């Protein structure tokens, strides 16, 4: 649905914000781009709908290369790409309903149709009853719901989310993430989000990329990345003290494997001693995944290691 190729953005100041970014977002998935401040995430998102013009490279959304379009064609293409923002970007002098109606007015949708669509959208995001309120009378979570309703007004296929939950408290964040997941499932909406918060990736993303200094370090389906040796994403999702102590083993349990009694099997079958040095276990979209750092001692550690690997676990050894 979104294909970004060799994207570069050099600002007038000489700052290289994007330094050759490739990204593929499949139709109907939630894709999260993670990175620290200054990594280039916002620039990337703004380049995807051409709010920012890339210095070079291409951006294709739903089969259309946006970098070659003229102004009028670009305006039309952008209607199929909704966007939500960290600080909501609502018009304070307009009611909730008028905020949501705004893009429909710009697109010259007739009044009666507009009204019906706004009512439908407010119900969709759980804001019926708030149509006549003003943004100042709403909580942060409610304001973001207005932002989401407005972004969906023109029935886009793609939603871009610029740190949409960063200004919200943890409970409200979860309810907005749940709403995005529901919209993704019910409408088949493809969502590309940027965040510096790992828990956003854990909660709702099917795929992820990590950015640093204008480049993508790693990207792919979250469950595939977890099964990949040396994955930076896995380290960030399941933090353990780094560097791993000499002689330790770091065992990654990919999807589903964390429920099996692997360690007790190891002790029983091979008579080894297992000392747990650290661990991190999480539910990723309903499936247990985790990392465990252990030290193993005994006669038959080589066979025990082969047993772990044979069970589909990823075992990384820190040489003593
Ligand atoms: N309009 C601009 N003009 C010049 N430099 C810019 C502009 N916007 C961003 N930059 C620079 O580009 C680099 C990437 O910034 P960007 O905002 O894309 O990163 P980010 O990962 O989204 O960070 P943050 O989360 O802090 O917004 C930074 O060095 C930033 O200072």
Image (cartoon, helix red, strand yellow):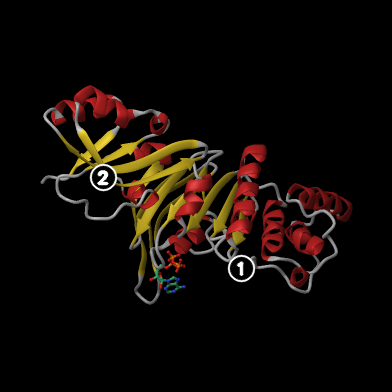
Mark sitting on residue 87: 1
Q: From the viewer's perspective, is 97 left or right of 163?
A: right
Secondary structure under the numbered disc 1 in the rendered image? loop
**Residue at x 69% of width, y 51% of height:** 152
Q: Which residue appears at 14% of the width and 33% of the height?
A: 298
Residue tagged 2: 230
Decide which of 29, 141 is in the foreground and name it: 141
Report whether residue 68 is seen. Answer: no
When the figure is inspected, residue 276 is found, relative to residue 79, above or below; the finding is above
Residue 207 in sight from this viewpoint: yes
Left or right, 295 with respect to 86, comes to left
Tell us which disc is closer to us: 2 or 1: 2
- Image coordinates for residue 282, horizontal then vertical, percent: 44, 43
- Residue 67, how many percent across, how many down? 48, 55
Residue 113, horizontal then vertical, whole percent: 85, 50
Question: What is the secondary structure assignment of the residue under circle 2?
Answer: loop
Q: Residue 214, located in which quarter of the rendered image?
A: bottom left
Q: In this view, does 152 lie to the left or right of 105?
A: left
Q: Which residue is drawn at 72% across and 70% down?
A: 91
Quick one: label 2, few (<14), some, or many (20+) residues within 10 Å? Answer: few
State the image quarter where residue 230 is shown: top left
């Amino acid at each position: 649905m979104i294909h970004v190729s060799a994207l570069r953005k050099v600002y007038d100041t000489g700052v290289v914000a994007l330094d050759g970014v490739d990204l593929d977002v499949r139709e109907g998935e939630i894709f999260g781009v993670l990175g620290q401040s200054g990594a280039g995430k916002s620039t990337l998102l703004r380049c995807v709908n051409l709010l920012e013009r890339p210095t070079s490279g291409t951006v294709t959304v739903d089969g259309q290369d946006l970098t070659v379009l003229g102004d009028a064609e670009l305006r039309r293409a952008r209607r199929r790409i909704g966007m939500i923002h960290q600080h909501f970007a609502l018009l304070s002098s307009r009611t909730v309903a008028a905020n949501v109606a705004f893009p429909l007015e710009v697109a010259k949708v007739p009044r009666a149709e507009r009204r019906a669509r706004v009512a439908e959208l407010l119900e969709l995001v759980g804001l019926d009853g708030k149509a006549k309120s003003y943004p100042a009378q709403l909580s942060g979570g409610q304001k973001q719901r207005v932002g989401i309703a407005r972004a969906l007004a023109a029935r886009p296929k793609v939603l871009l989310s610029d740190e949409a939950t960063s200004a919200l408290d943890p409970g409200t964040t979860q309810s907005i993430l749940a709403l995005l997941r529901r919209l993704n499932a019910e409408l088949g909406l493809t969502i590309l989000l940027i965040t510096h918060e790992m828990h956003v990736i854990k909660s709702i993303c099917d795929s992820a990329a990590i950015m640093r200094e204008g480049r993508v370090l790693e990207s792919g389906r979250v469950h595939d990345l977890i099964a990949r040796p040396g994955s930076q994403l896995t380290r960030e999702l399941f933090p353990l003290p780094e560097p791993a102590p000499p002689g330790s083993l770091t065992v990654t349990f990919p999807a589903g494997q964390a429920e099996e009694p692997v360690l007790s099997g190891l002790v029983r079958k091979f008579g080894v001693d297992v000392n747990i040095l650290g661990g991190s276990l999480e539910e990723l979209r309903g499936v247990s995944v985790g990392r465990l750092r252990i030290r193993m001692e005994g006669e038959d550690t080589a066979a025990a290691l082969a047993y772990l690997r044979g069970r589909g676990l990823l075992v990384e050894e820190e040489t003593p």
